[in-house]
Image (cartoon, rainbow, N blue to C red):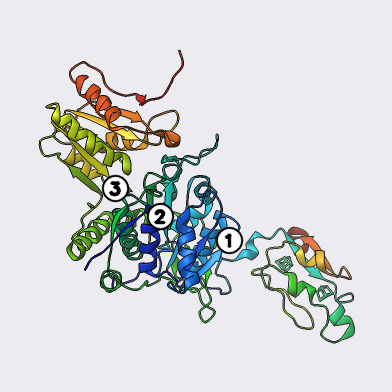
Amino acid sequence: MENIDTNVSGVCTPAVGEAGRTGEWRELRPVIDSTKCIPEVKGKPACFLCWLYCPDGVVSMTIPVEIDMDYCKGCGVCAEECPPNAIKMVREVDADE
Amino acid sequence: MNDVRIITGNEAAALAVKLAKPGVIAAYPITPQTSLAEKLSEYVEKGELKSEYVRVESEHSSLTVCISASTVGARVFTATSSNGLLYMHEQLHWAAGSRLPVVMCCVNRGVGAPWSIFNDQQDSFSQRDTGWIQIYCRDNQEILDTIIQAYRIAEEVYIPVMVCYDGFILSHTMMPVEIPDSGLIEEFLPPYRPHTILSPDDPKTINPVFFPTRRENSEGILCDGYMEMRYKLQAAFEKSGEVIRNASREWAEITGRDHGGLIWEYMTEDAELILTGMGSIATEATLAADALRDEGIRAGVVGIRAYRPFPKEEVAQAFKKATAIAVFEKCISYGYEGGVCSDLKAAFYGTDIKAPIHDYIAGLGGRDVKTGEIVDAARATLETVGSGDTGNKTIWLNCYKGI
Ligand code: SF4
Ligand code: SF4
């Protein structure tokens, strides 16, 4: 009973990249239009609904808003939630061009 | 002086839980729940047991509460029966897969449809492959003693344990039971030491998606894949037989009561005819063995106490000299035969045991199984020896099969 194997159940520590590079899953890339994004237009912290809703926590609460493309899986939740439709989901191949 | 009380199986179970002092008890209070959960709530209300008693809206939730509480470091208990156990099915897998030492009583009852509230073992039998240790008790004293042992076993191998006992035949029948001193429990049962404690100070994600392959985590350490985690459960089961045997032996040393480890035997040394089963039907079989001996037939009984892990080595040894084997079981794998029968045959494969094995399906939905019926069935099995009857069929005992 002395040595407890703590690795008997499925456990992981929340950390960037714990589930691998989820950015590799992405087919659609969120692209922010800075002329529509509320914090950028107003020049002060506001909205940040993309930050709030992103299931992967890869959106920054900064001006300008930035997305960590290593881990953004391209789900499009941010684009769906963005009130002024400042985020467009663009095909990865098209985005590269 | 010994504290001996005349109590039901459910009260014996409740007293055992009280002695094991779980931090959290969760139970669904309505049918198919039994008076066991009621007794426990009484102890908590009177302040005799300092547990958090969580009354939930379903059995799925009661086991979920136990899983959560166990994950944050509490010793836990729950109890259920029949369809309630079936409703827990998903969470049974979660408890075992998370390697949490949950202890639960399954008061064995038939499952619907059609409705039954009466005894058989189809409920726990149908949860055989959820990764729980299953121990079947034959009398009320064994229920009490086994629950204490179950905590010791579960917390040593990190496998949940289901203590099964027959509904009504044991759960609602009174027998003398000796209640051990609480000091004795402290000696036998060390405090629960969780393998992983979920705490805000050390955030962890429990049971995230595991991938088919092993993979590197964020620190570059190669971690187990799904298959490795499942292998570890099986490896722990392979170790658990020894732990069950030790718990039983040590309990016998301090209390003088030995219920056997994985199996128990009754007059098997010279037995030509061996009767076997799990729970109270095996107790009944000991009376049948006595009656058969009065007729001059050398009969004995092997009781299967642990159904999982299955006592492969023990049964190969115990049945070695048998010339005929009669299995009595209160459950069936539809389309094949009773589970104990199948498992025995598998355990005998490659050994010298070639005795005919008859599988008697008996007592479903509370149908009474009388000693005389067991005697006649076992005698009929013995009479087939040498007749070329392979015995590969189920025989429904005392069941009207139409014309
Ligand atoms: S919500 Fe989805 S698409 Fe938007 S940033 Fe987060 S992961 Fe990328
Ligand atoms: S939700 Fe849209 S407007 Fe709001 S911060 Fe994000 S990108 Fe800008």
Q: Chain of mark 3?
A: B
Foreground tag (2 vs 3)? 2
Question: Which mark, by number, is residue B10?
Answer: 2
Q: Chain of mark 1?
A: B
Q: Amino acid at mark 1?
A: Val
Residue neighbourhood size for the residue with mark 2, other residues' Cα within 10 Å, grouped as few (<14), some (14–19), many (≥20): many
Q: Which residue is mark 3?
A: B305
Tell me the CA gap for discs 2 and 1: 20 Å
Q: Is residue B252 shown left or right of residue B96?
A: left
Tell me the element at label 1: loop
Identity of the residue drawn at 22% across and 60% down: B246
Q: Would residue B214 be seen by someone viewing this image from the given angle?
A: no
Task: Please tell me which of labels 1 and 3 falls first in the chain.
Answer: 1
The one of B387 and A32 positioned closer to us in this rendering: B387
Q: Is residue B84 shown left or right of residue B366?
A: right
Tell me the element at label 2: helix
**Image spot of residue B276 (x, y percent):** 26, 37
